[in-house]
Amino acid sequence: MSESPPSDTEETSRGLSSEEARRRLADEGPNELPQERQRTPWRIVGEVLREPMLLLLLAGAGIYLLVGDLTEGLVLLAFAVFSVLITTIQESRTERVLAALRELSSPRALVIRDGQRQRIPGREVVRGDLIVLAEGDRVPADAVLLEAQDLLVDESLLTGESVPVRKTAPHPGTSLPPPSPGGDDLPYVFSGTLVVRGRGLARVLATGARSEFGKIGTALAHIDTEPPRLQRQTRQIVRLFATLGTATALAATLLYGSLRGNWTEAFLAGIALGMSMLPEEFPVVLAVFMAMGAWRISRARVLTRRAAAIETLGSATVLCTDKTGTLTENRMRVVALRRPDGSTWTRKDDASLLPEPFRALAECARLASADDPFDPMELAFHELERRCPQPVTTDLAPVKEYGLRPELLAVTRVWRSARGEILVASKGAPETIATLCRMDEAARAALLAQVEAMAGEGLRVLALARAQGAEDPLPEDPRAFAFSFVGLAGLADPLRPGVPEAVAQCHSAGVRVVMITGDYPATARAIARAAGIAADEVMTGDELARLDETELRRRVSQVTVFARIAPTQKLRLVEALKAAGEVVAMTGDGVNDAPALKAAHIGIAMGGRGTDVAREAAALVLLDDDFGAIVQAIRLGRRIYDNLVKAMLFILAVHLPIAGLALLPLLLGLPLVLGPIHIALLEMVIDPVCSLVFEAEPEEDDVMRRPPRPPQEPLFSWPLLTWGVAQGALVLALVTGVLLGAVARGLSDEEVRALTFFSLVTSLLGLVLIDRSFSASLREAFRRPNPMLAAIAGLVAAFSAVVLLWPPARDLLHFGPLHPDDVALTLAVGAGVLVLLEAAKSWLRRHVRAFRRGDGI
């Protein structure tokens, strides 16, 4: 890192040009630490070649080639290549989706380029950029300060010290010390550290691996996290099935070889049985569903930072939301002013000017706000100033700012006029301003009564005060000034248009919406009622502070509106709700919200106004800060989980008849029906059906009318296992009946094999149609379009026609010709599966609670 001070001649207002920034990015690389090696297509191929299913397929091909069956061996090799190709395409698609999501989740940085403030991904910050820092930001790169106002930075990531350090900008021409984290009053900020108070402007000195954080290694990138619950469950299931399949395959190989004396066929039969019992689709389907689910949710402008959130979305029972910017548009404007003498001004329309008697309020509000604000309230005060018939005093220069503190909910700014006079302006919570103005009890009560009346109209009320001060030295605490009360300002922030409907959807889905806000209770109640949130009882932060944990746990189950809540109290609310048995989703945007976001089952950070540390603590990020997007995410989360269960149910049901048809001929002394080549063909159908058809399945009609799913409910619940085994057993029974009937009719081995195989294929298509929906009937399910289903069904039909009508393909698979009555029989088997299982599903929906609930589990 360079240690030279910023040059006096260096441009500090326009920043780098876009062209120069692009050149430096190309020359020096992105501002990121070296990442774990990307999963390139070749790396994915290497991983696929180690899969047990592929190894079994290659073993079968090797045996055929060794015994001189070149055609069958080459076909199995072709299937292996096709399997590798399909898997690589699917995994590469998943990697592209994840890469796009990583790009969205890249920390954002506010830089000045071409004289304009721009939000860019942190990885695009380059050496020489001017970065604007504010409370809650992660510093994107190592930099030297040019300006600093009340700037405190948490550098514990580098130093291990939890106490924030004070940062100051150097005076022009002074010699700078060597850059080193830690210590107060130094001019350097470092990549990865957190701004906990104040704001500043800095010039970037080092990025990426050249930063201090880069020099200490990339340990953060290699932290192993606990795998999500579904991933653990699927791993356990695959291990169980693999163990049983291996043992069964070995036993069948020994039995067949001993009884029939043909060890080549014995090995091939064992390989076929092992392939039939290995549910390798489980982890593949889970990975595809989670990646594609995150992508689908991102299209609703919700970024998924942790895949486990998709699992949990369907279980949420309480949604805690703030008001400003989430329920409302975060577009404040001043609509009412009240002077100390009781006179009021109300905005009639957007063209109305501010009367002269209220000029002092507009001036005080403007002087207590930032010069170049982002905060919607401060923007509203700037707009109010422009309504004055004459401009507010402009010959004032800022001297000092006292920021918002938990113990003092007011912002105070000190100004000096051209004549050397000191003017102090403060805005904040009415209770705080009353304290600053040293009001007696009667005056305080009168003020709060006025606030209550304004807040009852749904307004957010701030109080204003001003003081004259001595020029030097200024006090360390604004309470030392002799403030006088100037008046009250009422601001309105309209509800977002779709909020009442979204709240109603939450209620119908069994999700209780709780509003937590720092606003006055009357304001909170008015906004909650407009949004459709029950507001019969409102708890304030002061009341919450007086409750013990037992009483708070009882009260949070009854109260849905919390007002005057400090950010630090959100954590208590989350813990109390969790202790009461709720599954909690929590929104937040500030630094102090991070503990609550991390403690919640589903932390939801604001992507627009949220701080970097809040986004890092959250599982989901709302890119548009829109409450409706949360409801859409819950809807999509339930759909994704439903479809995942359908896919897993199909896999479970499919493997039972395949394994049965591979094992029964060995036990009954019948001709082998399914060899490795046939099971490989079936896998070519099963994989795309699971990962494409079910993933694209539309949502259930009742997805937002059913209660939340119990959070600890396993993926394979007993009703699901029973239903899956029943489906597989029915298919196995019907297809076995076809097999035995064909043998009894004296058909050749090739004809028996063809008739049995295509009966199984039509049965599997029947299972797909049955498992498309838990709650809808077959007729209703057909009305829901799924283009992927039509495409897969068309491909299966085309494949069947080719095999049946083209003799070389028929001979390759050792199939005999099927006559029209045989084809009709295979179709009848598929239709029988449909009719019998649809009747069973209809009975289950009427008599079994799990199916009445609509989610099939």
Image (cartoon, rainbow, N blue to C red):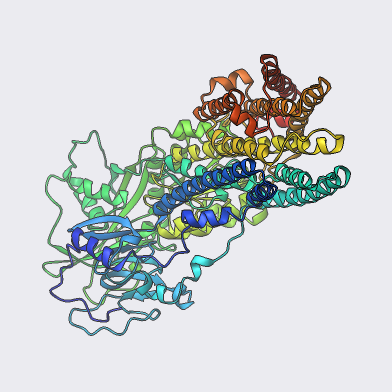
Depth check: 570 or 420 in front?
Answer: 570
Out of 248 and 496, give the one closest to the viewer.
Answer: 248
Task: Name the side, left or right, on which 750 lies relative to 463.
Answer: right
Residue visible at 59% across and 19% down?
Answer: 780
Where's residue 117, x and y in %?
Answer: 24, 56
The C terminus lies in quadrant: top right
Left or right for 748, reference 95: right
Please tell me in which quadrant of the rendered image residue 19 appears.
Answer: bottom left
Quadrant of the image containing the N terminus? bottom left
Q: Is residue 88 left or right of residue 349?
A: right
The quadrant holding residue 164 is bottom left
Instruction: Provide residue 525's location: percent of width, then percent of height.
Output: 47, 39
Question: Percent x, y for residue 433?
Answer: 36, 57
Q: Is residue 566 visible?
A: no
Q: Does residue 279 appear in the picture of this structure?
A: yes
- Picture residue at 36% right of the left edge, 80% below the top: 184
Residue 103 on image: x %, y %: 39, 53
* Nearer the observer, 414 or 803: 803
Looking at the picture, does residue 765 appear above or below residue 456? Answer: above
